[in-house]
Amino acid sequence: MRTLDLAGVAVPVIGQGTWRMGEDRHQRAQEVRALQTGIDRGMILIDTAEMYGDGGAEEVVGQAIAGQRDKVFLVSKVYPHNASRKGIPLACERSLERLGTEYIDLYLLHWRGQYPLEETVEAFERLREQGRIGRWGCPISTSTTCRNWPRRSALPTRCCTTWRNAASSSICCRGGNSTTCH
């Protein structure tokens, strides 16, 4: 399977999303099997969020990766209203509990919100230093580049386009081996 570099890690270009999972308990076993089948076929990047199914999607992922956490690259996202200095660590701990893991490979701010980006970055960096997350990312509009990043000591090491349509979107990630931002 082809791979791409995501924050210094080679991951398959095809991953598994979990939006709408965890909303119906009657579908849980089927959703877990679907994710496990994907993992078995090499789709080891799994994207989820605390928002999906009010945490239910993270619970589904946790069941699917139980006993095989080391095989997957796990991405989760924090709500903007939890993106404060105090809120991010608490949200992350809840996500880790639901996921049944000790760390998240890439932890993203779902979208910009009311908190200053510098405060969000500080909380992400603290989690990275503690080993709770491997990398973090923040959404950046196409007109914004990393040169305007709020905290020089936490300058992102990588910016990646996440989708293209009428309005492209990117994330800037911190962590991994890359030392340049593009």
Image: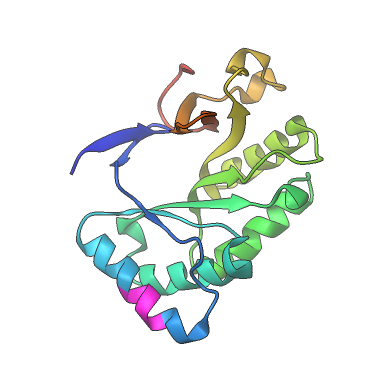
Q: How many marks?
A: 0
The residue segment tinted magenta is 29-33
Farthest residue to the bottom: give it. 26
The x and y percentages for residue 143 are 61, 17
Q: Residue at x 51, y 66 (%)?
A: 20
Is 6 displayed left or right of 116 in the figure? left
The percent position of residue 129, horizontal first and vertical second, equals: 59, 41
Q: How is the image coloured?
A: rainbow
Describe residue 10's horizontal placement relative to residue 49 as left or right: left
77 is higher (above) or lower (below) than 156: below
Quadrant, the N terminus: top left
Q: Is residue 31 magenta?
A: yes
Residue at 73% of width from left, 32% of height from top? Answer: 117
Which residue corresponds to the image point at 37% horizontal and 74% vertical from the top-left?
Answer: 32
Answer with the quarter of the image where residue 177 lies: top left
Toward which corner of the image does residue 72 lie, by quadrant?
bottom left
The residue positioned 46% from the left and 17% from the top of the image is: 182
Instruction: Tell me where residue 40 appears, x and y as whole percent.
Output: 21, 63
Is residue 143 found left or right of 134 in the rendered image?
A: right
The x, y position of residue 77, in whole percent, is 58, 51
Q: Nearer the viewer, residue 79 or 104?
A: 79
User: In the figure, 34 relative to 167: above or below?
Assistant: below
Say if the magenta span includes residue 47.
no
Give the residue furthest to the top: 147
Task: Give the overall secondary structure of the magenta segment.
Answer: helix
